[in-house]
């Protein structure tokens, strides 16, 4: 996860709240990061957590004995676009193979068609 990502924070293995990652800076301890979260509550709240690389990427951890996990949120619009891009990429990869199986591409000259 990176700055400006929206995350769903699971608390005790249940969805707890949404937040945006506002800042990630190295902590004094190597491999650990100070993570600034803007929590989408009313009123807005800001949290600062110190997380290691694995926790920042979605690994489970505990705070005061309570299980916590960050999960990236993907907009349904972006998810639909990603799926469409994957499908069109698969079609592009598949197309040359299909043309080889059919004996190659057929070329139609527009100049020849105009003469007729």
Image (cartoon, rainbow, N blue to C red):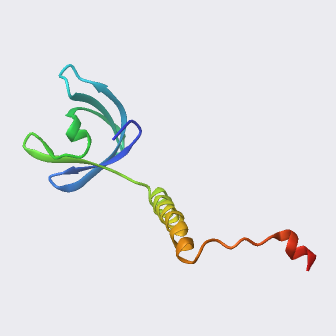
Q: Which residue of the protein is positioned furthest toward the right in this rendering?
A: 115
- Foreground: 105 or 87? 105
Q: Which residue of the protein is positioned furthest toward the left in this rendering?
A: 65
Q: Which residue of the protein is positioned furthest toward the front in this rendering?
A: 103
Q: Residue at x 68, y 73 (%)?
A: 106
Left or right of 101 on screen, residue 37: left
Q: Residue at x 52, y 76 (%)?
A: 101
Q: In the displayed structure, would residue 81 be above or below residue 115? A: above
Q: Quadrant of residue 1?
A: top left
- Foreground: 92 or 12? 92
Q: In the displayed structure, would residue 75 be above or below residue 40? A: below
- Foreground: 49 or 31? 31
Expressed as whole percent of the image width and height from the top left, the position of residue 65 reads 7, 43
Q: In the displayed structure, would residue 91 be above or below residue 42? A: below
Q: Which residue of the protein is positioned furthest toward the bottom in this rendering?
A: 116
Q: Which quarter of the image is occupied by the C terminus?
A: bottom right
Q: Residue at x 21, y 34 (%)?
A: 51
Q: Residue at x 50, y 60 (%)?
A: 85
Left or right of 69 on screen, residue 78: right
Expressed as whole percent of the image width and height from the top left, the position of residue 103 reads 58, 76
Q: How many marks?
A: 0
Left or right of 37 on screen, residue 66: left
Expressed as whole percent of the image width and height from the top left, the position of residue 6 reads 37, 46
Left or right of 80 on screen, residue 18: left
């Amino acid at each position: 996860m990176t700055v400006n990502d929206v995350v769903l924070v699971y608390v005790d293995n249940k969805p707890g709240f949404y937040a945006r990652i506002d800042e990630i800076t190295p902590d004094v301890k190597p491999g650990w990061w100070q993570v600034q979260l803007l929590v989408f509550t009313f009123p807005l709240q800001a949290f600062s957590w110190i997380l290691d690389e694995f926790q920042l990427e979605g690994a489970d951890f505990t705070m005061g004995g309570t299980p916590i996990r960050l999960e990236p949120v993907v907009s349904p619009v972006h998810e639909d676009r990603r799926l469409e891009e994957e499908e069109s990429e698969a079609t592009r990869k598949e197309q040359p193979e299909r043309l080889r199986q059919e004996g190659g591409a057929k070329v139609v000259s527009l100049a020849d068609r105009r003469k007729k």
